[in-house]
Image (cartoon, rainbow, N blue to C red):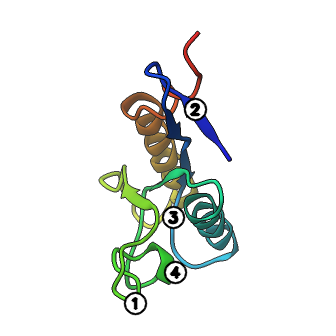
Amino acid sequence: SFIIMVVDGGYLPLRVAFVHPDLGLGGAERLVVDAAQELATGSHKCKVQIYTSHHNENRCFEETKALKPNGLQRDFDVKVVGSWFPRQVNGRLVALCAIVRTLLCAAFVAWCTPFFTEQAPPL
């Protein structure tokens, strides 16, 4: 089981963040969703968040929707960051815009979330 120790002597679950450019339908998306699902619900019981620059609930895997078909909440969080940046410029530069959107998303995770600061146990 993945755990980290806190100062009080108790234990907290490991926090895991995935960054993916577009959480739609596809093989890479399926891999990320399956990994997040297993880390959140398996024996690890990690706190998992997926950060993406685009997530359309009408075209995505059932596990990433806010409410699953059985009416329950999903086991991990999906946060959309950087969606304000355009997906293309005059029908061109699609790949460059996707790279910039993903970099914005990764920068947000690195600077605005505690995932990188809480991983090491105190000395």
Choose between 101 and 90: the one closer to the eye.
101
Residue extending farthest bottom: 69
Give the residue at mark 1. Answer: 70
Give the residue at mark 3. Answer: 22
Q: Earlier in the sequence, mark 3 or mark 4?
A: 3
How far, Cα to Cα, is label 4 from label 1? 14 Å
Give the residue at mark 4. Answer: 61
How crowded is the residue under tag 2: few (<14 C-alpha within 10 Å), some, or many (20+)?
some
How crowded is the residue under tag 1: few (<14 C-alpha within 10 Å), some, or many (20+)?
few
How far, Cα to Cα, is label 1 from label 3? 25 Å
How far, Cα to Cα, is label 2 from label 4? 31 Å
User: Residue 86, percent across and down?
Assistant: 36, 56
How far, Cα to Cα, is label 2 from label 1? 32 Å
Split into 4 quadrants, where in the image is the C terminus? top right
Residue extending farthest top: 123
Q: Earlier in the sequence, mark 2 or mark 1?
A: 2
Give the residue at mark 2. Answer: 4
Q: Earlier in the sequence, mark 4 or mark 1?
A: 4
Choose between 55 and 100: the one closer to the eye.
55
Q: Residue at x 57, y 57 (%)?
A: 95
